[in-house]
Amino acid sequence: MERFDVAVIGAGVVGASIARELSRYKLSTVVVERCEDVCSGTSKANSAIVHAGYDAVPGSLKAKFNVRGAELIRELSKKLDFDYRENGSMVISLSPEGHTGLMTLLEKGEKNGVKDLEIISGDRAREIEPALSPEVVEALLVPHGAIVCPFLMTIAFAENAAENGAEFRFLEDVTGIMPDDGRFILSVNGEEKYDVKYIVNAAGVYADKINNMVSARKLSITPRRGEYVLMDREVGGLVDHTIFQLPTKLGKGVLVTPTVHGNLLVGPNADPLEDKEDISVTADGMDEIKSKALLSVPSIPYNKMITSFAGLRAHESGNDFIIGEAEDCDGFFNAAGIESPGLSSAPAIGEYLAKLIAEKAGAQAKSDFIDERKGFIRITKLSPEERNVLIAERPEYGRIVCRCEEVTEGEIEDAIRSPVGARSLDGIKRRVRQGMGRCQAGFCTPKAIEILARELGISEEDVCKNIPGSEMLTGEVM
């Protein structure tokens, strides 16, 4: 049985952030993840928005961690080298009756410490965003809203944690937790494997299951499915701000936003489910988000759509984050019910819980903590001179594999060889965008399979899209 000070259950953005912050201290940490990679659950399929903090109820944990998390993400994007842009956001009202709702949001935001909020006229909103509907009457302008790449942010946290000593274990499903003389025995895949002093539950939609193994205060998490439409980079500049709708009798509405990679994203809806694995995309869901988004931006060119996807939100019945040590289980810490604004809050949650655990353990801060990390090389962002130098050193950087995103063989190798490297095709995609473009991996998949098999020392038939069972090849055609 392996012995660690701390086990973090879940390697999404919250778990990876907690691991990074724990790696500041003289604590041995293992991150246990049921999937094959980091960022494989809620963190991989969301709106990619860094919320400013105007929507959360003042005094709630969502408000506290959202505002602090947004501040940290701005700083961390530079230190850890991941994509981030403060593009600002707008909450639009389509009727004069919406003024009260906008005022409520403004007052909430000011109480939460969000700066520079302003209610503007519909005409002023259209001056800023010409594609907005002529039906827009007013808008709440939020200058400090931002967008981020959730994949690269999560991966940056994980890589930095690993560089500082945290260990990541994949394809390990936690099946039991047993208190044992002031410690815990953690079972994965049906077998006892880890002996740990502290546990952090960052298991997303399964956080209730993990909590309920040890605590009498039972949690109940309902997965809420949100569906999205992603459009080609050709139309990514239709809007610059993230456009939200003020809730009306027609429903909450959906957002229209650029992404940091230049695409246009529309969604989500909110469909409560029982199945914690159901990320299917439905015809009704697509019709819903498309029609609602047109209320904000009537000229959305859906003929430029390149893919659709869905993600799950971990909605806890108490409607707030559950963060901290369980009252009846010493050494067991929850980061549960992390729905929106969870992505925005993740760094602050990590900071808070790591400090709690370090204080409880009497752990000292490391003097040699590595505070920075260099992101993946993107050939398309280099000058011709820089490319030539790189290709002279490693010719693989001169061989294009993914034509849509201009991703080279060298970049794919980097994704696999990195500190918490890709072990699947989805893992490569999240790190260097191979397969993210217009053809959605229609041309580049065979070469990516070949590279992954070569780098991992496995057969091409064993290469998976993600978890085992998703193998891409089944045999040879004779």
Image (cartoon, grey):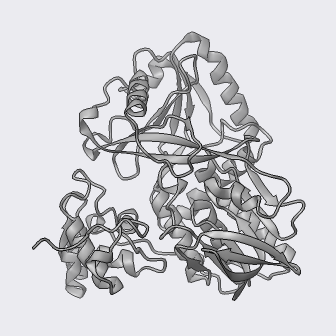
**Relative to 308, 360 lies left or right:** right
Depth order, front residue of 154/187: 187
**Relative to 225, 61 lies left or right:** right
**Relative to 73, 199 lies left or right:** right
Depth order, front residue of 106/58: 58
- The quadrant of the picture occupied by the C terminus is bottom left
- The quadrant of the picture occupied by the N terminus is bottom right
**Relative to 447, 133 lies left or right:** right
Q: Is residue 2 above or below residue 45?
A: below
Q: Find residue 212 and report its horizontal and vertical position in percent.
A: 77, 58
What's the residue at 73%, 40% (across, down)? 319
Q: Quadrant of residue 415?
A: bottom left
Q: Quadrant of residue 369?
A: bottom right
In the rendered image, is residue 326 in sight?
A: yes
Q: Is residue 280 above or below residue 476?
A: above
Q: Is residue 108 above or below residue 62?
A: above
Q: Find residue 381 and report its horizontal and vertical position in percent.
A: 30, 64
Q: Find residue 273 and report its horizontal and vertical position in percent.
A: 57, 41
Q: Find residue 15 and report its horizontal and vertical position in percent.
A: 63, 65
What's the residue at 56%, 75% (across, down)? 160
In the rendered image, is residue 80 in sight?
A: no
